[in-house]
Image (cartoon, rainbow, N blue to C red):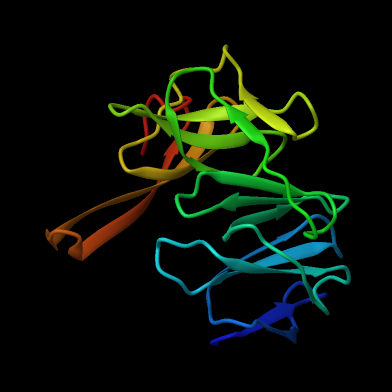
Amino acid sequence: DGATITVARTADGGATWTDAAVESAEPIGGLSVGFGDATDGALVAKVQTSPAFSRAHLFGTADGGATWKEKTAPVAGQVAVEPGGRLWLAGGVLGNELYTSGDHGTTWTKPSLALAQAGTIDTVTAPRDGVVSARVSDGTAARVARLTSPDGGASWRESASAQPDKAAPAGAFHQTYAGDTAGWAVTATGRCAHGKQDCAVTYAVQATTDGGRSWK
């Protein structure tokens, strides 16, 4: 509600809830929350701005969400927390930036992302099970690259042996795989009546069980 964020937490499987208020200095337009364990978590609150900017406030908790302390966030996006408290933040104006923090959001670094094939990273996700997923396009086609890190997260590289058939369905802007064959994608299709105005967009979730060769 404006600049006030209400966080609800439960300790009995959702039977009862306790609210905690988190105050932001600016109006908030979107939220992302992640926990590495039962106590250590982070909340990224995107500031209401034009699409040309990506600004956010980050709040951390060490008591399961009962209290929150403000830190810093390099961009707005989706936050993930590892066991032990390491933070990952994927977002930015275009959604293709990845940052990490080893001190609970006090300082941040930007890992390098290297592709095995030519292309431009359109969107990127925070690491999951040691894999960063990135949507890559080369002007004529789009695919999803899976990157792993040889140095503990300082850099991420797409393996030259990565399966090229993990293609994205038309209109995909987020995609993730669980293993080599099963995956999910969120797609957007639409049109605008007057240039970039009066647009209608339809979102869909699609699934693949054959590594991206077909989608339903």
Total numbered labels placed on residues in the image: 0
When asked about the image quadrant of residue 192, the answer is bottom left
Left or right of residue 95: residue 105: right
- Residue toward you, 33 or 124: 124
Left or right of residue 9: residue 213: left
Q: Report x, y in % for residue 13.
A: 76, 72
Left or right of residue 153: residue 112: left
Q: Is residue 54 above or below residue 22?
A: above
Tell me if residue 177 can be seen. Answer: no
When asked about the image quadrant of residue 68, the answer is bottom right
Q: Residue at horizontal 67%, vertical 61%? A: 73
Q: Report x, y in % for residue 48.
A: 48, 74
Left or right of residue 68: residue 128: left
Q: Report x, y in % for residue 143.
A: 42, 29
Image quarter in which the N terminus is found: bottom right
Q: Residue at horizontal 71%, vertical 80%? A: 8
Q: Residue at horizontal 41%, vertical 61%? A: 52
